[in-house]
């Protein structure tokens, strides 16, 4: 393996870890509805960043599928517009320990998904331009991840999160500040009154775009606030036995062959 390939692989791993942490912060955001949109934004950005790193052009639909964001309309209108969801979100956020655990689970899962997606692109196993292929790859990644001993990574994430509470809540405050105008503005009040539906509306797209624009602008500052945590995670994850990832890659290859990607 040449130096250039090793360097690119390390950069991609940093990209994966950074976005895994950013996704993992979202349960700690005390704003139901918008926390899910932030999660979707960073999940999609991870997929897009890895594709660009490998010179792959993905459609918006492919990115949504690979990020498990099934499209703007369903993400927002079918789920986040319901009163039941808002009540459950508020209750859950009042029980901090559940949110902290969910944050750790999200970092762990996103790290594995990013690793497997990066490996697939690097091996040249994905042909872009087909939503069916994207769905099959997403399914294969879920199968490979589901068979992994995720406790190895989760324990590292848990320890690093527990060491970095001040840093984490500082980054969450930055995200909340980025969304402040949206959360308490007229657009958000309008959006809260929407009812479940299958088709996206102008308000859906407008709100999603506003969230994306705010996060795109403020992500460098949010990312900078997490430098210490990301460096600690990167250092500690380097100690995970390579056999663990080799087994993960083998399960992915088997799942891909079964699904015919």
Image (tube, rainbow, N blue to C red):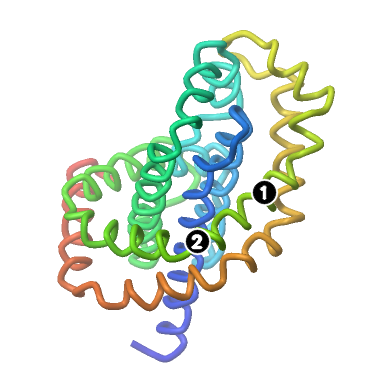
Residue drawn 42% across and 82% down?
Answer: 5
Q: Which mark is residue 175?
A: 1
Residue nearest the viewer, comparing 58 with 197:
197
Q: Give the image location of residue 44, x and y in percent.
A: 55, 46
Count of picture labels: 2
Q: Give the image location of residue 163, x and y in percent.
A: 42, 65
Looking at the picture, does residue 42 appear above or below residue 18? Answer: above
Q: Give the image location of residue 202, x and y in percent.
A: 76, 21
Q: Secondary structure at mark 2?
A: helix
Locate residue 92 relative to residue 139 in the image: left or right. Answer: right
Residue drawn 46% across and 84% down?
Answer: 7
Locate residue 118 relative to residue 42 in the image: left or right. Answer: left
Q: Secondary structure at mark 1?
A: helix
The answer to which of marks 2 and 1 sits earlier in the sequence is 2
Residue at the disc numbered 2: 50
Locate residue 95 relative to residue 108 in the image: left or right. Answer: right
Looking at the picture, does residue 169 appear above or below residue 225? Answer: above
Q: CA distance from mark 2 to mark 1?
A: 23 Å
Binning the other alpha carbons within 10 Å of mark 2 as few (below 14), some (14 to 19) or many (20 upward) gives many
Q: Nearer the viewer, mark 2 or mark 1?
A: 1
Image quadrant assignment for residue 60: top right
């Amino acid at each position: 393996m040449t130096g250039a390939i090793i360097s690119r692989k390390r950069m991609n791993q940093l990209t994966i870890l950074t976005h895994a942490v950013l996704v993992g912060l979202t349960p700690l955001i005390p704003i139901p509805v918008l926390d899910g949109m932030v999660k979707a934004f960073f999940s999609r950005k991870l997929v897009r960043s890895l594709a660009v790193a490998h010179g792959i052009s993905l459609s918006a639909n492919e990115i949504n599928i690979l990020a498990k964001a099934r499209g703007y309309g369903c993400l927002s209108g079918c789920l986040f517009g319901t009163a039941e969801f808002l009540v459950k979100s508020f209750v859950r956020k009042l029980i901090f320990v559940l949110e902290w655990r969910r944050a750790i689970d999200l970092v762990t899962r996103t790290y594995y998904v990013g690793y497997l997606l990066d490996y697939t692109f690097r091996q040249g196993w994905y042909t872009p331009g087909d939503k069916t292929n994207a769905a099959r790859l997403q399914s294969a990644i879920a199968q490979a991840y589901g068979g992994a001993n995720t406790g190895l990574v989760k324990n590292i994430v848990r320890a690093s999160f527990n060491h970095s509470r001040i840093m984490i809540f500082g980054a969450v405050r930055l995200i909340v500040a980025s969304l402040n105008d949206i959360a308490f503005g007229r657009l958000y009040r309008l959006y809260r009154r929407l009812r479940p539906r299958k088709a996206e509306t102008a308000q859906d797209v407008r709100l999603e775009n506003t969230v994306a624009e705010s996060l795109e602008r403020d992500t460098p500052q949010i990312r900078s606030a997490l430098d210490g945590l990301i460096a600690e995670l990167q250092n500690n994850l380097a100690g995970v036995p390579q056999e663990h990832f080799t087994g993960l890659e083998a399960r992915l290859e088997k799942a891909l062959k079964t699904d015919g990607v």
